[in-house]
């Protein structure tokens, strides 16, 4: 049995990770921004026989993240940084909606570091921090637009590469995963794969990640992702 922490767990890929880990017998701390809107997660926790506990955590807010970490009494085996927002889709060449842009950076770039800061005391040799990145982080992504999103995810990748180097001596492992184009609220109904397919691949990769590959970037299906 492993101890698992998952951010953004109210819906989407994170909710599927909660389900998969709980059904594998793991103890899951499911963190969600607004518990009053997390009906599916709350129902899952109620029927989990204590395997899943739900905790308020806005990854954009230091006090909220610290409070959530304070509710976790165990050491953590896998910490998944999943919470994310789309931001503005169309190119912002003449003016930028800074509130939306800053929100994307705060949630998807600063958020995972904020969560790492708060949970570091719960991590030990062999613990893993698995960050859900995106193919839009890579220099190979062939389209424009999504300025806040690409800035946040590309920054996340490079930031976590540095964190991987800084935590290597402690034996703490960092992973970066593009989860596929997934049929969630973010990915839309026309996306390539289901949340179950994505989360199944992400969980398998996370569980097998070794220190030798700390800081590397993979696709949900186990292929290396270009930078
Ligand atoms: N879907 C795709 O095709 C795709 C592709 C590549 C990468 N990704 C990445 O995969 C991750 C999950 O995406 P998804 O498709 O599952 O998206 P989703 O269905 O839109 O779910 C996003 C989740 O993030 C949470 N969230 C947003 N801001 C938050 C905050 N400040 N604090 C805590 N939680 C917050 C949302 O909570 P609320 O309900 O409170 O809003 C929600 O639970 C994201 O990082 C995304 O960038 C997705």
Image: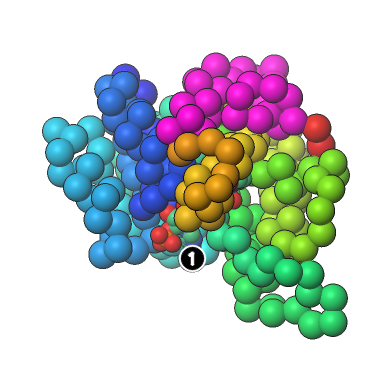
From the viewer's perspective, is residue 141 above or below residue 150?
A: above
Residue that lies at the very extreme toward the bottom in this rendered image: 95
Point 84% across, 41% down: residue: 140
Residue 76, image quadrant: top left
x then y, percent, for residue 187: 56, 51
Label 1 sits on residue: 61
x then y, percent, for residue 25: 27, 22
Q: What range of the chain is rendered magenta?
A: 196-225
Q: Residues within 10 Å of mark 1 (few under 14, many from 20)?
A: some
Point 60% across, 69% down: residue: 103
Magenta span has 202?
yes
Magenta span has 4?
no
- Specify whether tag 1 is near ligand 1 (CB below 8 Å): yes
Residue nearer the viewer, 168 or 104: 104
Q: Quadrant of the N terminus?
A: top left
Point 55% across, 17% down: residue: 208
x then y, percent, for residue 51: 23, 33
Residue 59 can be seen, yes or no: yes
């Amino acid at each position: 049995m492993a101890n698992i922490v998952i951010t953004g767990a109210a819906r989407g890929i994170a909710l599927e990770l909660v389900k998969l880990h709980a059904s594998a017998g793991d103890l899951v701390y499911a963190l969600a921004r607004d518990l009053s809107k997390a009906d599916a997660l709350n129902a899952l926790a109620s029927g989990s026989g204590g395997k899943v506990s739900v905790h308020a955590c806005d990854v954009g807010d230091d006090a909220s993240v610290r409070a959530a970490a304070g509710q976790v009494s165990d050491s953590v085996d896998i910490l998944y940084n999943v919470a994310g927002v789309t931001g503005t889709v169309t190119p912002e060449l003449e003016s930028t909606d800074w509130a939306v842009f800053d929100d994307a950076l705060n949630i998807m770039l600063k958020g995972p570091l904020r969560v790492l800061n708060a949970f570091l005391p719960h991590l030990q040799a062999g613990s893993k921090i698995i960050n859900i990145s995106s193919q839009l982080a890579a220099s190979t992504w062939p389209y424009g637009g999504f300025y806040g999103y690409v800035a946040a995810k590309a920054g996340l990748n490079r930031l976590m590469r540095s964190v991987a180097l800084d935590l290597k001596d402690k034996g703490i492992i960092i992973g970066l995963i593009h989860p596929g184009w997934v049929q969630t609220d973010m990915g839309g109904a026309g996306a390539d794969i289901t949340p179950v397919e994505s989360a199944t691949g992400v969980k398998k990769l996370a569980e097998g990640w070794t220190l030798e590959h700390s800081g590397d970037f993979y696709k949900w299906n186990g292929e290396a992702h270009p930078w």
